[in-house]
Structures are given as structure tokens and as C-alpha cells.
């Protein structure tokens, strides 16, 4: 592989096992799951637990989408943020969504424990952080909303940030103590192995080319077909290529990076001894965390979308340069640390930032679980339980999603104009904060961190 191609590939995708064989010929199953990421594989695992015969079809290789390209934060965030949820929905609905997010974290921790998945999980939580006093009010709102909904956490002033061992560029924060950080590639590989061990059939290199809406339903691939009682669409940002759920969510491109491994002296200079993950209080957040091999992984902040769900390149060189510039601003202690790799990929986001989970089709046998809006490590990994509950007509935590009325996206060109308008406003708010950061003196160090 050429150097520039390697630099654009997610480090997690280099960890995947040899691919399963593609589907050949015709077979029958109770359920055909389309998509081999966190959502699809968790569905296979959960539905095998219900005694159903499951076939998983993956167009590329398991984890090829956002499951194999994300930053590895396991957080209780659902929707845009908790204060926004409180402004949009009833108290009963918000409590249901908060319960779902918390249950999702516990479920992932249970998967890691029960299947002995070695994924470098650190249950250190994540900190919603301000980079300037202009953002302190939003941090306080987040803390009040979390306290009102019985979420575990701690509001941190400058001294509290110091006590928790967080980098000095972050001025205050709210520490979400549930969850933490992990290697999403290893987690995906562990769930894949568990689904196969449970008796699921996986066919990689097998894109679904057509879904015949019937009873039974039929899913076609280039070299075979599956006749099944139920179909699960777990293709997230690749859903538009199926010709279904076109108004559910928008395909958005996000980029990440990681540095070379830091030396002990460089790690001491940063003073990030607490190792909690960080995401900022910007309208379009920045995220940062340590990896197990002492790199700083960061990104997001700048997002792109193609007109009409057009597929964009995974990385944009201009955004690579802008992300590196922001990294230098947040971590001035590391002027000589090299950014070693950039990568990116699409996520799927609905207008209200909430996942889309439900069922449809003429016979109500086409189920879907998509639109994780960047929170898929927790919630997509819980998708299997949600869909098992939906299929078996049980009232589980996922009912907070499938019982709500979803807001459809408008057709083009209104969809594109809405995206540009919304992101333009978000970016203008964030620019004002970032310009103020440049003018502000950094928070001084208080003693030595260890």
C-alpha cells in the first residue's frame, strides 16, 4: 500500500481478521441483516440469543463503515446534547432517552466482560470541556440537566480540571463518569467473533443489490440471495445506496487523526494524567483522547456533505491542515509532536440527531437501526437488543426511539440548503469562541501533574 493510502486508512481497519466468504447461491434464514458494523453484528448476536437463524451480509468487510473509523469514545450522549433534548421533548421522553443511553453503556461493558473482549477499555469517563469562558454557561447547563436526570457526573472548575489531571487548555468541564475510551476496532472484532461463535452466518464482500418487499422477503447480492422472514437494515451512512429510508438522515463526512506515540517527557508536559476522554462544548465538537500506545487521537470539528448524498473522499487535505492547526492550539506543549495519520468516513445524522430505529415494509418485516450521529460505539452496539425487543414486541429501553415521530429530511435542494445553513450558523458560533481563545492567556499550570 502506498504511503498516502495508508495515511488515509483508519488504524482500526488494519486489525480486522481475514474476510468471511461472499454469499454464493440461495439460502434461507429467519433474519437477513444487511451491514456488518456494530449495529449489524450486535443484531446477529442478540437474535441468535432468541433462537433465530441469522445471515449477515456486508458489502466490504465487517467494520468498514463508521464502526471501524470512529474515535473510540463510549459516552452517555444521545442526540445533540442533553439540554437540547430537554428543549425539544417532554420530560417523560427525555428520561426514556437518557435511560436508553445509560443502558447502552452498561450493555457494551457487559459485552466486553462476558465475551472477554480485549479492546483497551479504560472506564475513565469523558469530559465535556470548555476552551474559553464563553462556553462556561453551556457546561453549567449540561451539568444541571445531567443532575436533574440522575446521571453520574461532576462539574469541574479550573481547580477541578487540574485535580482530574486534564490538559491546561481546557478551562472547565463536566465529567461524565460513566463510560470511557476504547479501541473500536478491537471491540468490533470481538463482537464479530461472538456473533460467529453464536452460530450467525457472515458473508463479506456481499453487497445487497435489491430488497424484495414480500413475505418472505428476498435480499439479492451479486452472487446469491437470501429468503427470510425479516430483514434488518443496519447500513447507517450507506443506506441511501439501498434506495430506502432516503428521508431518514443525512450522510456527513467526519475526519480524525492521531499523533506519533508521545515520549514520557511529552506526556508529562501535557499533564493529562487522568486519561478521561475530552469533547468540547463547541456546536460542532472537537474530540481528543489517549490511545493505549500513548498517542493523542483527535478530530471532528469540520464536517462535509455531498449534494444528493454524493459520496465524498474520506479525507480532504485542507481539513487535515486545519485539524492540525487546532491540535497545536489545544496542545501548545507539543510543538514538535508529529501528526502521523489522518482518516475519515461518513456518519448518518437525522434532523433531531437521534437514531432511527423501527420497522416498515408492506408486511412490517423490514426493520432498521441507523443514524447514530457519532454515538454508535454505545448505541449501535445495543441495536441488537433494541431490534430483538421490537421483533418480539417487548417494551425495552429502545421504545424511546421507535415510539417517537421522526422528522423527515426535505428533498434536494432544500436538504443541501438546510445543511449549509445549519452548519454555517454552528461554524460562526465556534469561530467566535476560537478567536477569543487566541486572544486569551492560557490557564497557568498549578504545580506538577503526575
Image (cartoon, rainbow, N blue to C red):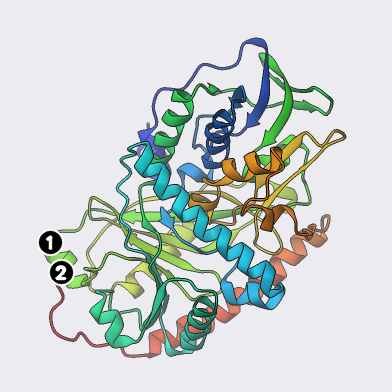
Residue 35 x %, y %: 60, 34
Q: Which residue is mark 1?
A: 264
- Compared to residue 200, the image places residue 410 above or below, namely below
Residue 357 x %, y %: 69, 48
Q: Which mark is residue 441?
A: none
Residue at the location (51% across, 55% down)?
Answer: 103
Residue 439 x %, y %: 39, 90
Q: CA distance from mark 2 to mark 1?
A: 6 Å
Left or right, 416 with reference to 327: right
| Residue 186 appears anywhere in the view | no
- Compared to residue 7, the image places residue 252 above or below, namely below
Q: Which residue is mark 2?
A: 268
- Compared to residue 207, the image places residue 295 above or below, namely below
State the residue in front, 321 or 397.
Answer: 397
User: Is the C terminus in the top left, top right, bottom left or bottom right quadrant?
Assistant: bottom left
Residue at the location (54% across, 59% down)?
Answer: 101
Q: Residue furthest front?
A: 394
Amino acid at each position: 500500500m502506498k504511503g498516502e493510502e495508508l495515511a488515509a486508512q483508519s488504524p482500526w481497519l488494519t486489525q480486522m481478521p481475514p474476510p468471511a466468504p461472499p454469499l454464493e447461491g440461495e439460502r434461507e434464514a429467519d433474519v437477513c441483516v444487511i451491514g456488518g458494523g456494530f449495529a449489524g453484528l450486535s443484531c446477529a448476536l442478540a437474535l441468535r440469543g432468541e433462537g433465530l437463524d441469522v445471515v449477515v451480509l456486508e458489502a466490504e468487510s465487517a467494520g468498514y463503515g463508521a464502526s471501524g473509523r470512529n474515535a473510540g469514545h463510549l459516552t452517555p450522549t444521545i442526540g445533540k446534547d442533553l439540554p437540547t433534548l430537554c428543549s425539544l421533548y417532554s420530560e417523560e421522553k427525555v428520561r426514556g432517552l437518557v435511560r436508553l443511553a445509560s443502558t447502552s453503556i452498561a450493555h457494551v461493558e457487559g459485552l466486553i466482560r462476558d465475551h472477554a473482549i480485549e479492546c483497551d477499555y479504560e472506564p475513565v469517563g469523558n469530559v465535556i470541556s470548555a476552551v474559553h469562558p464563553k462556553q462556561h454557561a453551556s457546561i453549567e447547563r449540561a451539568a444541571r440537566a445531567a443532575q436533574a436526570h440522575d446521571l453520574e457526573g461532576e462539574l469541574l472548575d479550573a481547580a477541578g480540571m487540574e485535580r482530574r489531571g486534564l490538559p491546561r487548555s481546557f478551562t472547565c468541564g463536566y465529567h461524565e463518569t460513566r463510560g470511557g475510551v476504547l479501541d473500536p476496532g478491537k471491540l468490533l472484532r470481538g463482537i464479530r467473533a461472538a456473533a460467529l461463535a453464536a452460530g450467525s452466518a457472515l458473508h463479506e464482500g456481499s453487497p445487497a443489490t435489491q430488497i424484495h418487499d414480500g413475505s418472505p422477503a428476498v435480499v439479492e447480492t451479486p452472487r446469491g440471495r437470501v429468503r427470510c422472514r425479516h430483514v434488518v437494515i443496519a447500513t447507517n451512512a450507506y443506506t441511501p445506496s439501498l434506495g430506502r429510508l432516503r428521508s431518514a438522515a443525512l450522510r456527513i463526512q467526519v475526519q480524525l487523526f492521531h499523533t506519533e506515540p508521545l515520549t514520557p517527557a511529552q506526556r508529562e508536559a501535557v499533564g493529562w494524567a487522568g486519561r478521561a476522554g475530552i469533547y468540547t462544548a463547541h456546536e460542532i465538537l472537537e474530540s481528543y483522547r489517549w490511545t493505549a500506545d500513548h498517542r493523542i487521537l483527535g478530530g471532528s470539528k469540520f464536517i462535509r456533505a455531498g449534494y444528493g448524498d454524493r459520496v465524498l473522499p474520506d479525507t480532504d487535505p485542507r481539513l487535515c491542515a486545519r485539524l492540525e492547526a487546532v491540535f497545536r492550539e489545544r496542545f501548545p506543549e507539543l510543538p514538535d509532536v508529529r501528526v502521523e495519520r489522518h482518516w475519515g468516513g461518513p456518519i448518518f445524522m437525522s434532523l433531531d440527531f437521534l437514531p432511527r430505529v423501527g420497522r416498515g415494509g408492506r408486511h412490517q418485516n423490514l426493520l432498521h437501526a441507523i443514524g447514530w450521529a457519532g454515538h454508535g460505539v454505545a448505541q449501535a452496539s445495543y441495536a441488537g437488543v433494541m431490534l430483538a425487543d421490537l421483533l418480539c414486541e417487548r417494551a425495552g429501553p429502545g421504545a424511546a426511539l421507535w415510539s417517537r415521530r421522526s422528522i423527515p429530511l426535505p428533498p434536494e435542494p432544500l436538504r443541501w440548503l438546510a445543511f449549509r445553513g445549519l452548519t454555517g450558523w454552528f461554524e460562526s458560533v465556534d469561530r467566535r469562541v476560537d478567536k477569543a481563545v487566541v486572544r486569551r492567556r492560557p490557564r497557568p499550570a498549578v504545580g506538577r501533574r503526575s
